[in-house]
Image (cartoon, rainbow, N blue to C red):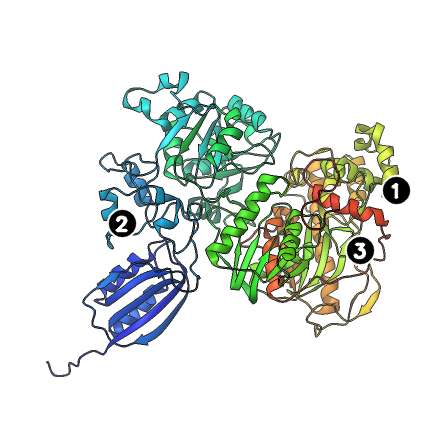
Amino acid sequence: MALGDEPRARRRLRARVTGTVQGVGYRPFVAGLATRLHLSGFVGNDPGGVFVEAEGDDAALQDLLRGLRDGPPLARVETVRVEALALRQDDAFRVVESTRDGVREALVAADSATCAECLAELADPADRRFRYPFVNCTNCGPRLTIVTDVPYDRAATTMADFVMCAACRREYEDPLDRRFHAEPVCCPDCGPRVRLLDPDGSTSRGGEAEAEVEGEAAGDPIRQAAALLRAGGVVAVKGLGGYHLAAVATSLSAVTTLRNRKHREDRPFAVLVPDLATARELCVVGSADAADLTGPARPIVLLPRAGGAVRLADAVAPGQATLGLMLPYTPLHHLLLAEVGEPLVLTSGNVSDEPIAFDDEDALRRLGPLVEGLLVHDRVIRTRVDDSVMRAVGRPGGRTVPVRRSRGYVPAPVRLPVPAGRPVLACGPELKNTFCLARGSSAFVSQHIGDLENYETLRSYTDGIDHFQRLFAIAPAVVAHDLHPEYLSTKYAFDLAAADPDLELLGIQHHHAHVASCLADNGRVGPVIGVAFDGLGMGTDGTLWGGEFLLADLVGFTRVAHLTAVPLPGGARAVREPWRMAAAYAGLLGLEGLTVARRHDRRWDEVQRLATAGVNSPLTSSAGRLFDAVAALVGLRDEVTYEGQAAVELEQHADPAEAGRYPVSVLPGSQLPGSQLSGSQLPGSQLPGSPLRVCGEDLVAAVAEDLRSGVAVERIAARFHRGLAAAVVTVCVQIRNRTAVTTAALSGGVFQNVLLSTLCREGLEEAGFDVLEHQQVPPNDGGISLGQAAVAAAGGASVERQPDADVVAQRPDQRAEVEDLVVAERRGAGVGPPRRVGRGAE
């Protein structure tokens, strides 16, 4: 031994790694790193995550521990716990078999878009997976949609039905191969196969379209499907989490046919484009948008249109200033898009208001009558998962916010600011439903379930809850639900409690859940001034809320201000027919001579009389209904065919150069000492006893005056948005002056309006507020379940209040009417008899 050389200390460590570390190539990553560091030991999976034992000199072990916190591209490491062990003198580092012993803490990865290496193989004629539509590796491919249990091994996926060939087995068992324990690994010799079916379910011969396909390609189902699409047909395509309906996006006849068959009158379609360059020809794409479009989640991204060379059919997104674009995320999509050579409409495989089809027999039954062919495969989809949707907000190149959080993001957990002491199930709302399971600091928000209005969606909801409970080993002790007793999600909570008296039921007010969701999304506990603007939600006083200012934390809230309540004439019909809201506001203000009144002259007076008398006209403070009234007044939309259509069109008509705004009065409430928040030590003087009233009717009156003066609709729309945003700032400042709370949180579906949210954020920041907005979950009802879970974890509840001073107490028989209206809101259907499902049936 040379002078000064000393033997390095040899140690052995055990590391427990938790997070998304199964099914993402984490074990081969660890094995490769440990081998390069000349360490011995082993790595394996168990229900808790990944376990590692490593032995070697101390410096190499420290390098390993640093590496464990990084991992391969799809890994998300949450914790690395380390302990010292006695030396064992292993002769190498190896990957060991998984074990099913232990507490289940391992996380399931989200589905991920095809990686660059797999795409290179897909395009290489010399590769054995050339043009194979299921090529994948540990860095990409299906995860949540195929997993049936944990630990995540092939036997616990729907790939268990496919026996690996010798070549795939060699890759699967080689720790140095990127397909080492890639559970969906397969090839043309041993994996799933694609078929093209005729609408009746028989194997397609391609029909007239086959004449376009020559030679060996004549038997290629993907080329046959492409020929059907080029010929103007509609094709159902089985993807990762369900079926899509596809049509050539540049063909007016094809897109119109799809729209008619799907019974989708106006709602825009998503468009699949081959690459970022094509996306930039169609839309303005900022850096954050580009990151979403090309990232592993591959959501639909809503973007402003651009005047590029690619021309889509007008029927793709009629009257819209934005487009929903997505890039291909499976090998099958890449191959099909390349064969067609044109952008494709790729919309959910369903008829309006139905859940997306994912079961093959169900898809044939429901989609067969809508298409010229079905491009199917024999890999079973375990979990139905819709595409995610993001929207660009703020300045170009800024950030994106979820509109629908689903494929590519779920089931990655959201961290709760207050850990749940007991496991929680949050049942979510009725519309845009998600559910959420929580344990400790982890909240597992489900994929988009949809509107709980039919048996198929309800079955998907209950199956999803059962599946998540198994995957994450969560047996709820607390069940949180909306206050609305007729929501099917609430009835489900009641049924659980009826079956298990030990369960604790916790009712969470809808708008408190919105604000709590924004708090949890930002890792905060409050207090905040929560601005919750949406369509309709059941208030604690039995009225319909929707334009709320709440002084809130995760435990409680006080309603400190709201938009003035106005009648909802005709109940749910007013949701479908915005002109009725215009009539309600006009009646309150005594407005006459309106163009919208002349358009509905035979019914206008009758509707106003109903509103004045309070007959089938419950009161609502809804911000969404205020947008409806203005959209109808200016002539943009008297009836809607999908949720939020009137508000969307009003936003899109706003002139960005207009700097004017309409004034809004804020009427004071009576004074009451103290706070009903959990943080009763809040600084400040007094809080409103009856809330401040924000006079939305001032905006309507100003709109009517400008219309009479001939002001352009674009300027009116901008002044309305600016006036409402200024009112939000004014009210928040007044509340801050009384409470010293300096943080504002913006939530609710109305804040999907980029113009309004931007104006509010900028105005509040200029006024010195710290402004919280959604980042991980949508501001709409898709984020409600996270808010419910956060409140339940913090041990909170909804604060009951007496009816506001400016709201006349409703007749007892109107309470049930209000409940039905919230259920019917946004469905475009009249109010029928209340549904009675499960506990609480009469």
Position above or below: 768 against 599: below
Residue, disc 3? 693
Mark 2, other Cα within 10 Å: few <14 / some 14–19 / many ≥20? many
Q: Position of residue 630 (x, y in %)?
A: 74, 40
Given this view, does label 1 or label 3 mark the residue nearer the observer? 1
Horizontally, is 571 left or right of 121 in the view?
A: right
Q: Amino acid at mark 2?
A: Tyr
Residue 218 in the image: x percent, y percent?
Answer: 32, 22
Say whether residue 250 is visible: yes
Q: From the viewer's perspective, is 697 left or right of 133?
A: right
Q: Which residue is mark 2?
A: 172
Query: How far apart are labels 2 and 1 at the CA level?
Result: 72 Å
Q: Residue at x 73, y 51 (%)?
A: 538
- Of badges 2 and 1, the one in the foreground is 2
Q: Amino acid at mark 3?
A: Arg
Q: Which mark is residue 561?
A: none
Q: In terms of depth relative to the viewer, which is nearer, 824 or 609?
A: 824
* Quarter assignment of residue 731: bottom right
Q: Residues within 10 Å of mark 3 (few under 14, many from 20)?
A: many
Query: Residue 841's x, y, as percent?
Result: 72, 47
Query: Which one is nearer the viewer's eye here, 202 or 242?
Result: 202
- Place residue 134 in its image quadrant: top left
Circle nearer the N terminus (2, 1): 2
Q: Earlier in the sequence, mark 1 or mark 3?
A: 1
Mark closer to the chain start, 3 or 2:
2
Question: Mark 1 sits on what residue?
Answer: 612
Query: Disc 3 and disc 2: Cα gap in Å?
Result: 65 Å
Tell me the element at label 3: strand
Res 602 → quadrant? top right
Q: Is residue 301 left or right of residue 626?
A: left
Q: Residue at x 34, y 34 (%)?
A: 193
